Amino acid sequence: MSEFKFACPGCGQHIKCDTTQSGSQMECPTCFRKLIVPQAPAGDAGKLVLTASEVAKRPATTVSNGLGAVAPGTTAKPGPPVAAIAIVVILVAAGASAFIFRDKLFHSAPKPKQSVPEETAAANPDTDSADSNSPAVTNANGAPPPDDSKWTLDLEGVEIPDAPAAGRVRGSGFGLQRATIKGGALDLRQGPAWPPDLGISIAFFATRPEDLANKILTITATQTNAPKVTLRWKDDQQKPATHSVKAGYAARFEFGAIAGGRLPGKFYLCAPDEQKSYAAGTFSAEIRRPTPPKPKTPKPPAK
């Protein structure tokens, strides 16, 4: 016979008893609980202190500790039903799929595109800004439709907008970014360099900008001796292209006084091309003087 120790589950009192008492009932000398003596451990496991179970309660589940001893276990808490977990997983997966494929499932209508004005060059002394007065974007080309009421070959009574020039050139939205005049040639352009992305050039019957200052010029569609108008744009390969109009267009130019090396003014021009190009508004043209001719080198005297 040999002895071993076990603990009271109520007060923790260590109790010594003989191995022959395993499985029998006895009373704790401290708390007087009725206990069931645990199974005596075998071999070296006798050094372990076991815990007894109370008579009135269900014996604790015991597990082997791998050394031949039986250690008290803990009663597992009941978990959620497997069916409930499966339902939750299915609902989450269905919700995620509906969110990912919501456009295909519900065929939502596309959002309308907002109007965006043409970009303009950064402000500097040689640039006319058109940030707040660019034409409204109403089609894929960024220009008003061809039958827009702003295009007309009868400018009688038409008011010129008091805003930086804007319109349409060969189907693309035009916003004035720079204006220059050299001699009698006025260039209105959009783009940072020459040749411009879009532009309108007018060759007036004048040799100097001073000849146009404070003048009003009206050109009717029936006029045969009108100044030549050149429409400028870039094709699909970004190569410069032009179209000249010598008659059949309507225009009105009102020039102001020259100041600070610039010729200000406002205009309204409608061309008879298929795309119904037009532009209207104000400008301030930088005056560029013609390059003086190089002096001729005198021929050496004949010998």
Image (tube, grey):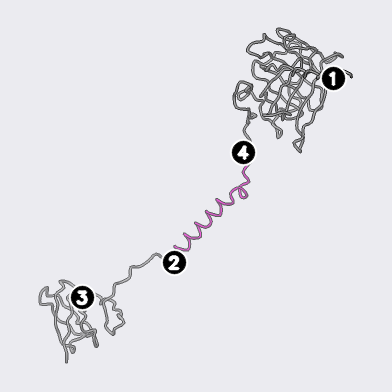
The answer to which of marks 2 and 3 sits earlier in the sequence is 3
Residue 14 place in picture, x, y as percent:
14, 77
The answer to which of marks 4 and 2 sits earlier in the sequence is 2
Crowd band around label 4 with a 10 angstrom C-alpha radius: few (<14), some (14–19), many (20+): few
As drawn, 238 above or below 25? above
Which is in the foreground here, disc 3 or disc 1? 1
Q: Which residue is mark 4?
A: 111
Q: Which residue is mark 1?
A: 300
Which is in the foreground here, disc 4 or disc 2? 4
Amino acid at dot 4: Lys
Mark 2 element type: helix
The residue depicted at 59 percent of the width and 51 percent of the height is 101
Q: Which residue is mark 2?
A: 82
Q: Check whether the beta carbons of the residues at disc 2 and disc 3 lie within 8 A of each other.
A: no
Is 172 colored magenta in this rendering?
no
Left or right of 294, for residue 129:
left
Left or right of 274, for residue 44:
left
Q: Check whether the beta carbons of the residues at disc 4 and disc 1 lie within 8 A of each other.
A: no
- Tell me the quarter of the picture where residue 137 sits: top right
Q: Which residue is mark 3?
A: 56
Which is in the foreground here, disc 4 or disc 3? 4
Real-space Cα separation, disc 3 to disc 1, in angstroms = 139 Å
Q: Residue furthest front?
A: 303
Amino acid at dot 3: Ala
The magenta segment is: 84-108
Crowd band around label 2 with a 10 angstrom C-alpha radius: few (<14), some (14–19), many (20+): few
Crowd band around label 1 with a 10 angstrom C-alpha radius: few (<14), some (14–19), many (20+): few
Left or right of 292, for residue 40:
left
Q: Residue furthest left?
A: 29
Residue 257 place in picture, x, y as percent:
67, 8
Amino acid at dot 1: Pro
